[in-house]
Image (cartoon, grey):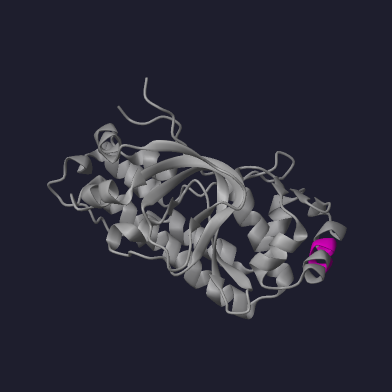
Amino acid sequence: MPLVYRNAMLHALHPDILQRLHLTSLMLPLRRDIEVPGTEMHQIIFLEDGVASMTASFEDGSQVEIGVMGFESVLCGSSMMGTARSLNRVYMQIAGRGYAATVTNARLEFARHGEFHGLALRANQAHFLQTAQTAGCNARHSVGMRLARWLLLCADRMESSVIHLPHEHIAAMLGCNRSTVTVAAGKLQLDGLIIYSRSKIRILNRLGLEARSCECYRTLFDYLADASNFANILRSEDPFTAPEFRADLSTFSSKITTFRDPSDEPQSATLKPGNVNRT
């Protein structure tokens, strides 16, 4: 019986490719560094559970988050395209687990210009779009809007309405101080959108939180969910251009799951990852 993969890219890959990647499982504890500025990358990681943050670091020791990654993501993905050393820090913001492949094996598979190549390019493009949108968001939108957006991003990747993270960590990700986050969270709680304690936030009204968020959340979500925004980058002679694979490729970019609390009305369609690899 094939392994059950939650990671969107691993789920979409043919078993022959998975075998060539020689995946190894690994646990990813809280604060585990995945990429360190100036350090070589030796493996790529496919997250199954947990949330990783990409941050820009500054000389005074401060940092600000420029990307949130979960089971839809490939960490250290730029190494497949020739990047030797990372510029940004990537670490586990919420503990989880995943699968790793060596950069050597990933580059060999990427060079085959087949299924893995196409999905890797799409995953990296999605990550680029998120960091670009986040840069604009950090410059233009209020802390309250950005907090709502950040909570939605984490809930999507955890498929849960509960987020365990202290306010000071959230403040660091948003590039502000803890008291500012506390005030913003207090307003969301007063309006019945969330309930929070020192290290736990529960989303009570998902649709209301989306309405409070800036447009960056929905803009990026809608773009990635529309397969027409991505060209078919597989070679025509590739065996994985069969109809069943094209269906997987067309939905790969929409694997960012939208969590909906059962009490929310009206219910909107959710985007769920598949559970079992194709055989």
Magenta region, main secondary structure = helix
Residue 240 vertical placement versus 228 (above, below): above
Tell whether position 174 is magenta. Answer: no
The x, y position of residue 6, in whole percent, is 47, 37
Q: Is residue 156 visible?
A: yes
Taking the spot 28% from the left edge, 63% from the top edge, the residue there is: 82
Q: Which residues are magenta?
A: 183-187
User: Left of 2 or right of it: where is 34?
Assistant: right
Q: Nearer the viewer, residue 66 or 61?
A: 61
Work out which residue is located at the far top of the displayed protein and give it. Answer: 1
Residue found farthest to the front: 39
Q: Quadrant of residue 248?
A: top left
Q: For the point 54% across and 71% down, which residue is it?
A: 56
Comparing 11 with 21, the one in front is 21
- Which of the image's four quarters has the N terminus? top left
Residue 217 percent coordinates (x, y): 58, 63
- Across and down, in percent, residue 147 comes to 70, 64
Query: What residue sits 36% from the left and 53% below the top?
Result: 42
In the visual, does 231 lie left or right of 59? left
Q: How many marks?
A: 0
The quarter of the picture where the C terminus appears is top left
Lateral position of residue 235 relative to residue 119, left or right? left
Queried whether the magenta region covers residue 186, the answer comes back as yes
Residue 258 visible in image: no
- Residue 178: image x %, image y %? 78, 67
